[in-house]
Amino acid sequence: MTLSTIDIVVVAAYAVFIFVLAQWVSREKAGKPKDSSDYFLASKSLPWWAIGASLIAANISAEQIVGMAGSGYAIGLAIASYEWMAALTLLIVGKFFLPIFLRNEIYTMPQFLEQRYGPSIRTIMALFWLALYIFVNLTSIIWLGSIAVNQVAGVDQNVALFALGAFALLYQIKGGLKAVALTDIVQVTLLVAGGLLVSALTLGKIGGDAGIIGGFTELARRAPGHFDMILSPDNPHYRELPGLAVLIGGMWIANLSYWGFNQYIIQRALAAKSLAEAQKGVVFAAFLKLLMPLVIVVPGIAAVVLAPDLARPDQAYPTMLRLLPPGLLGLVFAALIAAIVASTASKINSIATIFTLDLYAKYRKIPTLAEDDVSGRAGGERKLVLVGRITACVAIVIAMLTARPLIGQSDQAFQFIQEFSGFFTPGITVIFLLGLFWKRANEAGAIAAAVASVVVSFLFYQFLPEFPFMNRMSVVFLISLALAVVLSLVVNARANSNRITMQGVNFTTTAGFNAGGVAVILILIALYATWW
């Protein structure tokens, strides 16, 4: 399959428009050089709509669209729990985590760990996150994106992979986070509109004269096993989504780690102009998450009826795009490219942020954003931005070269990413939850939790490979938590190791946040009651 001339024109117009827009919105006043606050935290001036849209744009990429649609094809609507439970998680992050982070002027997650526990764990976790972001997340984004481009546009996959990575790099390398976040409202609008269009056309094709609603009814009739939200133990995919653990078990650990303590997600909220603005952005993102299964998962389920003999589940979404007529195909393909580019650019910027501020600046003793030495900081600002840009280039080159050997053999890439990340997320969640809400927690306990999470997860994976990985995360979380608590009680913390203040932290939220939160919860109850 190849794109028609009109499709190519639409995609090219999008690429030019979004590139020019990114450079324009991130420009600085004449004579003012871009400093590290501008580059890594968008001058701490992001409005709520940019925060909410950028949270979704950073999250929804090829690994979500192609990967989750593939899981929808293989598993069904149950995979939508990743999206719907994330909406509730975002409310928790907005109400309980952001007030502490913003009050303490946190700009990276490793920096929080140093201020809470000490310098050792900051370095350990910075190195860990860099490895995870480059070799798991960034590789998966551009690899799955290249699959989609190959199958929809007929472009050689290697060419597509390098083109996507290069465009995402150039798109953000000058403007940094501001270039990414302030254009993400366009990216998300295109993504949602394009995804809804694919869902409507696929359901319309299934429904025939009965239309979209009739198509959904017919899809549920012809693929009833794909509409179980809570899988039973005899389901062949129970290992991936083990029943009620989706609602009350391991998925909470994964979601809290991802949405609350993940640099390239939380960085948008840390760049807010105020706490209230950050919380409004989080609620906006929560509503968008409720919509995502209709954008992503439904086309994958529709492929069960329209393309039942696919060789691999990850081919579901690209195959559904082939149903679109010229022009519309270009629009939806541009939406897919938008998602890939936005998420890749976000990941690149966060990699640059962690390396520059948590490793390079600390090693070279250059004052950074959280420090008061303005005169000392001024001399290093230009160097920090330059190091950030160099890091961005190196990171994407490494990801391009390692994507095929690391991700290329996975049948369901989305599930692969979740399971691999699950080795680390229990320990990360323990470290941050104790750091935020238990004064006695110390660095010895935190490091023990991080190490135990990886070691115990690996032992489970080796000796109990059929044990559902969400249940594994729950067990590992409890073991890591117990170890962290015991060591924190037994080992004395270093003097003045906890520099996180709770003075002035207020967990009271506005009436608007509360109303939005209640609406999200009621919608979730209705969804699960309908598809239990």
Image (tube, rainbow, N blue to C red):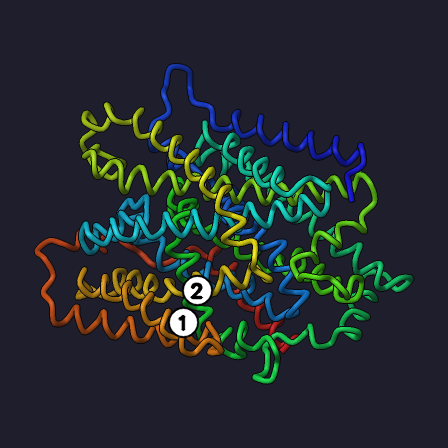
Q: Is residue 363 left or right of residue 427?
A: left
- Which residue in the rendered view is the most extreme toward the bottom? 234
Where is residue 129? Give x, y as percent: 36, 51
Crowd class of label 2 (few under 14; some 14 to 19; many from 20; radius 10 Å) = many
Residue 390 is at least partly visible in this image: yes
Q: Where in the figure is residue 215, as x and y percent of width and height?
A: 82, 65
Q: Choose between 438 and 360: the one closer to the eye.
A: 360
- Residue ID for mark 1: 473
In the image, residue 240 sits, relative to residue 265, either above or below, namely below
Residue at disc 1, secondary structure: helix
Mark 1 and 2 residues: CB-CB less than 8 Å, in contact? yes
Q: Residue at the far front: name it.
A: 405
Residue linked to disc 2: 254
* Residue 265 in the image: above or below residue 17: below
- Residue 401 point in image, percent of width and height: 49, 42
Amino acid residing under circle 1: Met
